[in-house]
Image: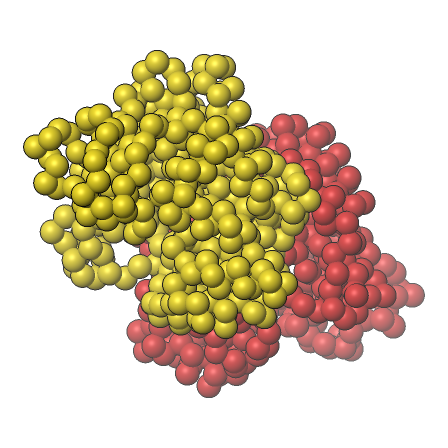
Chain colours: A red, B yellow
Amino acid sequence: MKIGILGGGQLGRMLIQEALKYDDQFHMLDPNEDCSCAHISVFTKGDFNKKQDVLDFGKDKDVVSIEIEHVNVEALEELEKQGVKVIPNSNIIKIIQQKILQKQFYDEYQIPSPEFQIILSKEEEIVIGFPFVQKLNTGGYDGKGVQIIKDENDFNNLWDEPSVLENLVDIDKELSLIIAKNERGEIKSFPVTEMVADPKLNLLDFNICPTQISDDVQNQIDVIAEKFMKAADSEGLFAIELFLDKNGKVWVNETAPRLHNSGHQSQEGNANSQFEQFYRVLKNLPLADTSAFGFSGMLNLVGEENFSGKVKYEGLENVLKLPNAYVHLYGKTETKPGRKMGHINVLADSREELLEQLINIKSLVKVVAE
Amino acid sequence: MKIGILGGGQLGRMLIQEALKYDDQFHMLDPNEDCSCAHISVFTKGDFNKKQDVLDFGKDKDVVSIEIEHVNVEALEELEKQGVKVIPNSNIIKIIQQKILQKQFYDEYQIPSPEFQIILSKEEEIVIGFPFVQKLNTGGYDGKGVQIIKDENDFNNLWDEPSVLENLVDIDKELSLIIAKNERGEIKSFPVTEMVADPKLNLLDFNICPTQISDDVQNQIDVIAEKFMKAADSEGLFAIELFLDKNGKVWVNETAPRLHNSGHQSQEGNANSQFEQFYRVLKNLPLADTSAFGFSGMLNLVGEENFSGKVKYEGLENVLKLPNAYVHLYGKTETKPGRKMGHINVLADSREELLEQLINIKSLVKVVAE
């Protein structure tokens, strides 16, 4: 089968890696000839934000999907009309790629998400209380396009663009659920994972599985997942990022219509990975078992501040000596501050052992330039 | 790093798949433009048995290795002289690729292997007792070039070529050990696995891990492995195929200087796979943990008799529905009788459960042509 993916980054790379267990052909569209997938797929250089590029790329594929949501949706709509299978469908990608539509979607389907106000410019009257988060309608990614406005003194910093202003949740835990649906209607989720964010880069830092949550919290998440999948009405693999507040209530922070950083530990930590599951969705195969093997966790390998250029992984050998650690690099030759270059998965018998190992490993490795 | 591999079959494919976790470039040499590695590597069409092809291919690589042992050794010797790292070294490949040299090597280093006689033609006096196995000096592979001579009536069938004639061992179990050595001198083996051969095709059928053997048998194997690695005097990953006879004595059947079918279950059954280990050998990295997770096993997906042409996997969906089964296909488009097209790994909590699952899965799938 000819599978076409918009984007050729690390998510695509790990999908291809997993799918090498099978016999399909992966075609990737990316503007960067040296992207993570360039040398391991049938590669097309092109811009996934340009309608014509996406149309030309997609027209002869059996299925077209994404590994990044910032793609030209008009082209996907047209491909659907032409009879090309698009997963997830263009409608849910369009909703998710615009923060305003995404919030309205949660509202419409009674999916709990933090109170919000929509503004089209900074001239509008701000009625939401302090502190709040401003999220740009488009262009936000990996912590970019998001800022906290603490009080009136911060007003000057407000971006003058269409945005969602959102109440800050008093967060107890950041959780994530990866869930998949195939064309035959099967739905399966992975065990809920727990994230620890690096406050400086605002990138996912540790992600551990399973999280310790009460039955009530698990129930709230199950209800949210069910509502979301019904409302999205699309095959695909989705990451639902959640906040658990200090009163025990669960809120949806954001959703990604694709493979997600918070599912990486599934590569060694679960019976099957998010990549295997996504492959099965693309082929409409029976969904895979997602059970967790004991405790697992992930830490991102992110380019250090003040280093740009040809990447060098300091201390990686020390990690390779550890029995329960699995190094994953993304085939990126150049590092820059904050760039996701790889990740390390860890297996453990207890949560304590897991966190200890993750902290130890974090102290061992540094992503610098030669 | 530029890694060059002679051969572009499934062993190379699964090596590349595993090594996609890292940042190296794989270059493959194979005569078949549509081989398992063609579309996922920097591919060179050429004959790994032709000296010039191997020389041209190898000269600019950081390391050259093999995924099949029937390669031009003279070229490897010359590459070594030119300063190219060859793993395993040309000397041990040369010994292993000729059954006569291989047997003499075991003899010289007191590695127990079945009693034998060497003949250069069928005119020679046969002094070995019946029944015996005739193994052609070169050209044997996957059960080809091997036959049993039961008694004098079978004499007519004797091949008129340089061969090893070998006493039949009264086999209790067929075992296999995968062992690796890196340049820094670390040596690590995988837990011993047990094979069940299909008597018709003489191809490995089930391979299970761990095997049930006594401490004494494990000790004999450890001694053999140590002697072999010392005698081979080479980095590399090796498969030592063993017979355990009904008196509890262990014999070496054959050795492969490469990744091996009897290590495939390590993909999901062990902390790290033989492919990860071999990658680490090629890069001289610390060797990986090889511990087994519970019980694991593997069955080959082999082309059914009477089917040739575009491959079709009947019943594969039923396997994908099973929780502890992992399907691995080799990207081969054409099937023929006896061709290895893929394998399925299975995890279980006990040996009984494992065998039950393997037998069940074997009954579910058929490799036929469209």
The image quarter containing residue A294 is top right
Left or right position of A233 against B187: left
The image quarter containing residue A130 is bottom right
From this viewpoint, which residue is outermost toward the left? B153
Residue A111 spot, x, y in % from top left? 55, 51
Say if A48 sits above or below B151 in the image.
below
What residue sits 75% from the left and 61% below the top? A312
From this viewpoint, which residue is outermost toward the bottom? A52
What residue sits 35% from the left and 63% below the top? B35
Q: Quadrant of the C terminus of chain A?
A: bottom right
Left or right position of B366 against A96: left
Q: Quadrant of the N terminus of chain A?
A: bottom left
Q: Depth check: A265 or A132 in front?
A: A265
Q: Depth check: B88 or B42 in front?
A: B88
Residue A275 in view here: no
Residue A351 in view here: yes
Residue A195 spot, x, y in % from top left? 68, 45
Left or right position of A291 against A126: left
Say if A86 sits above or below B9 in the image.
below
What residue sits 71% from the left and 30% below the top? A353
Residue A211 spot, x, y in % from top left? 63, 36
What residue sits 40% from the left and 34% below the top? B241
Residue A192 spot, x, y in % from top left? 57, 40
The image quarter containing residue A135 is bottom right
Left or right position of B298 against B65: left
Q: So how many labels did they put on this image?
A: 0
